[in-house]
């Protein structure tokens, strides 16, 4: 080999090595390491970038304020997502959705019951205001007709009940 060939091969090797050093490593939102020769997206926080070309091999988290303890440092880095943790998250979301659906169904039934009660109260109020004789059954099973005082008391009670409608 001639000297120009050796020199050009050496320069080419150095150039390629310098390109290989221009690598970025960061943790995504799920805790997985991402490798790229382009910078991470702007949504990646600075403390999640592990390696960048201008960092000289030191993680960004090490240059920032260091955590007080090793446990705190370990908690700042998220562990990779496993199938078991994905299943756990899925089951948790499924349970939360079922709870929301049950709560919405309960609220819907309560609203329907309230509307039905309001309609009954309105109908009873119309009967009381109509002046027609209203009979009730007493504790002995005998028919008793309402007098005007009882009618006025019932009317006042119905109006109180309709205040919530």
Image (cartoon, rainbow, N blue to C red):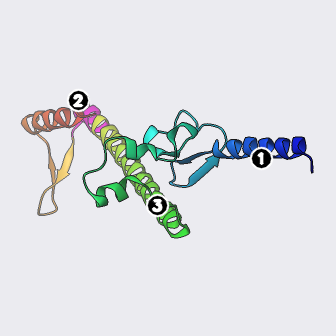
Sequence order check, earlier mark of 2 and 1: 1
In magenta, the rendered stretch is 123-133
Distance between mark 3 and mark 2 Cα atoms: 72 Å
Q: Position of residue 119 (x, y in %)?
A: 34, 38
Q: Which dot, 2 or 1, sits closer to the camera?
A: 1
Q: Residues within 10 Å of mark 2 (few under 14, many from 20)?
A: few
Instruction: Give left or right: position of 48 versus 39.
Output: left
Residue depicted at x 50% and y 40%: 55
Q: Which dot, 1 or 3, sits closer to the camera?
A: 1
Residue depicted at x 19% and y 32%: 159
Q: Position of residue 74 (x, y in %)?
A: 36, 59
Distance between mark 2 and mark 1 Cα atoms: 102 Å
Q: Which residue is mark 2?
A: 129
Which of 16/64 is in front? 16
| Mark 1: secondary structure | helix
Instruction: Give left or right: position of 26 versus 8.
Output: left
Query: In the orientation shown, which residue stands out farthest toward the right?
Result: 1
Sequence order check, earlier mark of 1 and 3: 1
Q: Position of residue 125 (x, y in %)?
A: 25, 34
Q: Which residue is mark 3?
A: 79
Query: In the orientation shown, which residue stands out farthest toward the front?
Result: 3
Q: Residues within 10 Å of mark 3 (few under 14, many from 20)?
A: few
Q: Which residue is mark 1?
A: 13
Distance between mark 1 and mark 3 Cα atoms: 37 Å
Q: Which dot, 3 or 2, sits closer to the camera?
A: 3
Residue depicted at x 55% and y 68%: 83
Residue 131 is at least partly visible in this image: no
Count of numbered badges drawn on the protein? 3
Sequence order check, earlier mark of 3 and 2: 3
| Mark 2: secondary structure | helix
């Amino acid at each position: 080999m001639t000297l120009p060939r050796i020199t050009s091969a050496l320069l080419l090797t150095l150039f390629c090595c310098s390109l290989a050093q221009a690598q970025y490593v960061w943790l995504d939102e799920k805790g997985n390491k991402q490798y790229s020769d382009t910078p991470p997206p702007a949504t990646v926080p600075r403390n999640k970038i592990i390696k960048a070309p201008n960092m000289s091999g030191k993680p960004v988290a090490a240059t920032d304020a260091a955590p007080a303890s090793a446990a705190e440092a370990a908690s700042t880095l998220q562990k990779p997502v496993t199938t078991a943790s994905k299943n756990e998250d899925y089951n948790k979301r499924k349970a939360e959705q079922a709870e929301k659906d049950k709560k919405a169904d309960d609220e819907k039934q309560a609203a329907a019951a309230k509307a039905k009660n309001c309609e009954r109260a309105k109908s009873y109020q119309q009967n009381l205001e109509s002046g027609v004789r209203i009979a009730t059954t007493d504790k002995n099973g005998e028919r008793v007709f309402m007098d005007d005082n009882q009618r006025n008391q019932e009317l006042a009670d119905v109006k109180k009940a309709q205040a919530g409608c």
